[in-house]
Image (cartoon, rainbow, N blue to C red):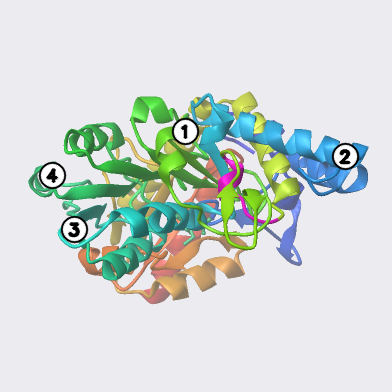
Amino acid sequence: MAGSDILDTEKIRKEFPILDIEVREGIPLVYLDSAATSHTPNVVCECIENYYKKINSNIHRGTHKLSVDATNAYEEAHDKMIEFVGGSDREEMIFTKNTTESINLVAQAWGLKELGEGDVIVLTEMEHHASLVTWQQIGKRTGATVKYIRVDDSGKLDMEHANEIIDRHVKMMSLVHVSNVLGTVNPVKELSEMAHENESLVLADGAQAAPSMPIDVKELDVDFYAFSGHKMAGPTGIGCLYGREEILEKMEPFMYGGEMIRKVTFDSSSWNDLPWKFEAGTPPICQGIALSKAAEYLEGIGLDNIWRHDNELAEYTMVSLSEMGGVDIYGPPVGEERGGLVSFNLGSSHAHDIASILDDHGIAIRAGEHCTHPLHRVLGVSGTVRASYYLYNTIEEVDKLIAGIEEIKRIFE
Ligand code: C6P
């Protein structure tokens, strides 16, 4: 299958056996939904199998061989993941369940203690519910006000508006790095500088960025960075939170129980060192180890290459849809930097109808509001159809999508 000029997709696809399945007899899978969940290469599947066959055991507890092996592998997985986002200290990498839990950890462990009446939390209109609902509810509980940086007609943040609302009252700015609907790449570094000048902390939601672009948390100048394993060729049930050590040290634990304590009496408890203070109970041991394998795999291909490949497929999709006519495409126009996804609508056709007809052809895309209800109100639509790409997708697959859309257009006309 023809890929882009950047990646050897033929070779890459051999690593992902699921791509060879037929969704129904004679209908091969065309998977264009990696922004929801990506697929898992053999090397990660083998790592999971190997874990359960050879070292499965609880960590930080046993003195026996298996427990020591599992503990070492789990701790080394933290080292790999902090390196993956450009950090250096294991203390700054917390394993969670997913991006949602990473954001909730900061919101509850930091926000409930530090926020109050008169404080402001700045979000953007393109936030995923993982960030929007979480901070909205923290605002209600603490009395802090939530303000949203507007999205302009080209799907980018209105930086003048950001300038207006980022002032001394802001204590937290939580913004999505790459939008899961618009594909917009937000100027995280520039906004971080504005927030830090006002002594606000900054959290970036990297759910759609970490899987496909090189991340350097120091360069981005963020205090927290959240992302999920299942969108970056890793398993479900594992997510990451990078946090600056001095802030994490001051934060209260997120959850209480085993693992996260140092000493416990009937009256009081003290907390374990970072990052374990934030990993209560038996953690996702196998998932964490497998995620570090996924990170190694992606680095082997090159995050820069993956970014350019996904981008090329997105641009090709946008150009093809534009040439077809009658299609509304959302987010930055062709030629501008964007993530490897394209959201669109076909006249007044319902997004779910389009998704279900495409599914008849084996084409898996996502339709609906993509956990961004308020953004869809800003766009003035009830839903969108979204195709999203990853390292294993090909131009031929995009052509199949375009042919499917053309057929749907003919049916509806
Ligand atoms: N988006 C999609 O767009 P979890 O479910 O915790 O792994 O990820 C949540 C999340 C947070 N931020 C952004 C920008 C996201 O895109 C997502 C997940 C998926 O299809 C599911 S709604």
Q: Quadrant of the N terminus?
A: top right
Label 3 sits on what residue type? Lys
| Whole-percent x, y for residue 42 in the image | 77, 41
Residue 63 - label? 2
Residue at 41% in and 43% down: 250
* Mark drawn on residue 168: 4
Q: Is residue 139 above or below residue 44?
A: below
Please state if 77 lies on the left or on the right of 131 as rendered: right
**Distance between the alpha carbons at the discs numbered 1 and 3:** 28 Å
Q: CA distance from mark 1 to mark 2?
A: 40 Å
Residues under labels 2 and 4: Cα distance?
51 Å
Residue with the mark numbered 3: 147
Q: Which of the 4 image quadrants contains residue 327?
A: bottom left
Contact? badges 2 and 4 (CB < 8 Å): no
- Residues shaded magenta: 275-281
Answer few, some or many: residues within 10 Å of disc 1's Cα (few below 14, many 20 plus, some between 14 and 19): some
Q: Is residue 32 left or right of residue 124?
A: right
Q: Position of residue 167 (x, y in %)?
A: 12, 45
Which label sits on residue 194? none
Q: Earlier in the sequence, mark 1 or mark 2?
A: 2
Tag 1 residue:
213
Relative image position of residue 344 (x, y in whole percent): 35, 59
SS at mark 3 in the image: strand
Asked if residue 291 is positioned above or below residue 189 in the image, the reply reads below
- Crowd band around label 4 with a 10 angstrom C-alpha radius: few (<14), some (14–19), many (20+): some
Discs 3, 4 touching: Cβ within 8 Å: no
